[in-house]
Image: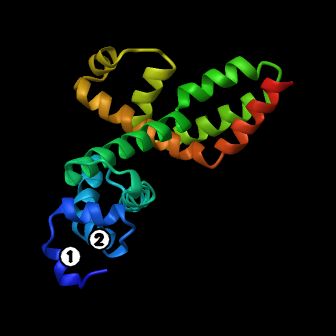
Amino acid sequence: MLPEKEYQMWPDAELLALLRLDDRKAFEMLYNKYSPKIYHVAYNLFRDKAICEDLVQELFIDLWTKRNNLNISSLEWYLKVAIKNRVLMYIRTQKATLDLSAIAMLTEKYATDSKLLQNDISTILENNVERLPEKCRQIFTLSRKEYLSNKEIASRLNISIKTVENQMTIALRYLRAGLTDYLPMIIAALILIAES
């Protein structure tokens, strides 16, 4: 291991070569140099401080784990692409996990014998819909219960389509958050029903 001042003067290619040889100081220098930049990239895509910090940590842990097999020409480019992919994967995974229409579809498909589960989910959704701000609730109801398009809702309420889209996004985000606490129970119940 070399003195810290020497590491700071070295280009990324040299630090990567040292990293491949298990040099922790080289790793620390790369981490200190790039983690703030990578965090900034992540935060611009997904504005959740804690999650972005976790994703950056995971990325650097992965970099350390794969250090002996690294074949990177531009570390900065590699890290920026890698963090974007991690953020997008996280967002996709969370939406898949909390997608209301997927839950409704699974419930319809597998819970025909379980009116109790359907009633529980319906009650949770209805309670959360009732808590939405008035305009948001009205737009959500027109969309999901009267099956109106965004254009039809905008026309009926004399508002812009963009306002309808924004209010639907707010409503769905709120309803997903409201289901998060119940999601493990719902999924477990659906799995049990599917297996029976």
> Where is the C terminus found, in terms of image quarters?
top right
In the rendered picture of this protein, how many numbered marks are placed on residues? 2
- Identify the coloring: rainbow
Question: In the figure, residue 66 lies in which quadrant?
Answer: bottom left
Question: In the figure, residue 105 lies in which quadrant?
Answer: top right
Task: Report the amino acid beneath label 2.
Answer: Ala
Q: Position of residue 84 (x, y in %)?
A: 30, 44
> Where is the N terminus found, in terms of image quarters?
bottom left
- Disc 1 is placed on an element classified as helix
- Asked if residue 110 lies left or right of residue 74, the reply is right
Determine which residue is flagged by label 1: 7
In the displayed structure, 143 sits above or below 117; it is above
Please name the residue shown 45% across and 58% down the image. Answer: 65
Label 1 Cα crowd, 10 Å radius (few <14 / some 14-19 / many 20+): some
Give the spatial CA distance, label 2 vs label 1. Answer: 7 Å
Please name the residue shown 52% across and 20% down the image. Answer: 145
- From where the camera sits, is residue 135 visible? no
In the displayed structure, 41 sits above or below 29; it is above
Task: Report the amino acid beneath label 1.
Answer: Tyr
Label 2 Cα crowd, 10 Å radius (few <14 / some 14-19 / many 20+): many
In the displayed structure, 148 sits above or below 30; it is above
Please give the label number shown on residue 26.
2
* CB atoms of marks 2 and 1 within 8 Å: yes
- Asked if residue 115 lies left or right of residue 95, the reply is right
Q: Position of residue 150 (x, y in %)?
A: 33, 19
Please name the residue shown 43% across and 55% down the image. Answer: 62
